[in-house]
Image: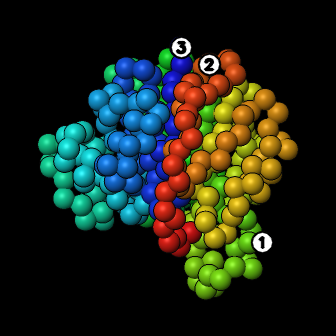
Amino acid sequence: MSLFITSLNSGSNGNCYYIGNGQEAVLVDAGISCRETEKRMHRLGLSMQNVKAIFISHEHGDHIRGLQSITHKYKLPVYITAPTMRHSRLILGEAILQSFNAHQPVQIGGLSITAFPKLHDASDPHSFVISGSGVTIGVFTDIGMPCENVIRYFKQCHAAFLEANYDEGMLERGRYPYHLKARIRGDKGHLSNEQALQLFKMHRPSFMTHLLLAHLSQDNNNPDLALQLFSMHSDTTNIVVASRHEETAVYQVMANSITKPAVKLKPARRHAVQASLF
């Protein structure tokens, strides 16, 4: 009775999250190339043959950059709303396109995927929770502020990918122009370390075993800073920072149990740093 999760990449240079049950899996977003997705999954002992669908949160390039190449090779169904597809300007075969409705679960084998609206500066942004085997995993990134939907679903999660995009002081002192700073910290921008921490402290369920800090800014955050901040309040929740350069370990998440790494990784190769706005 468990699910397996990993971040294949997390940041403005590309986002892709894997959630599966051993027989089937889904990807949430496809922001890195097909080749890089395959390489990282191979290093983790995961197979693209188990991936049965891709769910797209919104149309920004760091969430869809690899979608066309992955679907061309694997002919996977893509769950995406009509406004997101229209604004993405991608060309995908119509046969693989599937829509979804907010708060209505989509069944993919033994996995149930529920989308819900969130606040972000995109045409029709959604986040997702994935449930199966008595376990619920949330993917909460690209969120301007924790709205009622985010809080409601966060409370259900045994593990979650949670955006901690920027440190408020680093953003304020940084090189970004005022309009970009305002966009990032606005109600339709990104979550700061402090906003994410307050969500975690106030609404974390007692059974949450793992939290992966996601979508950290290269310029306005520091992995050690974020990890230290959350670790002071983690109690029994295991805190991991999802990298913008490489995959995390695969973690096995079990209901009413402690989350443990499911795969012991060999040292992963570092990848070239890509320029980032966020």
Crowdedness near tag 1: few (<14), some (14–19) or many (≥20) residues, C-alpha within 10 Å: few
Q: Is residue 129 left or right of residue 37?
A: right
Give x and y (percent) for residue 209.
69, 29
Cα distance in 3D space between marks 2 and 1: 37 Å
Q: Which amino acid is tagged 2?
A: Ala
Labels 2 & 1 near each other (Cβ < 8 A): no
Q: Give the label on residue 137, or none.
A: none
Cα distance in 3D space between marks 3 and 1: 42 Å
Q: Give the label on residue 169, or none.
A: 1
Q: Which amino acid is tagged 3?
A: Met
Labels 3 & 2 near each other (Cβ < 8 A): yes
Toward the viewer: 77 or 175? 175
Give the residue displayed 44% in from the left and 47% down from the top.
16
At mark 1, the secondary structure is helix
Q: Which amino acid is tagged 1?
A: Gly
Q: How many numbered discs sit on the rendered protein?
A: 3
Q: Give the label on residue 1, or none.
A: 3
Give x and y (percent) for residue 221.
69, 64
198, above or below 52, in the image: below
Toward the viewer: 61 or 13? 13
Residue at the outermost right position: 232
At mark 2, the secondary structure is loop
Give x and y (percent) for residue 211.
66, 39
Toward the viewer: 42 or 234? 42
Residue 170 in sight: yes
Cα distance in 3D space between marks 3 and 2: 7 Å
Crowdedness near tag 3: few (<14), some (14–19) or many (≥20) residues, C-alpha within 10 Å: few
At mark 3, the secondary structure is loop
24, above or below 7, in the image: above
Reading the image, the residue beneath label 2 is 255
Give the residue displayed 58% in from the left and 79% down from the top.
180
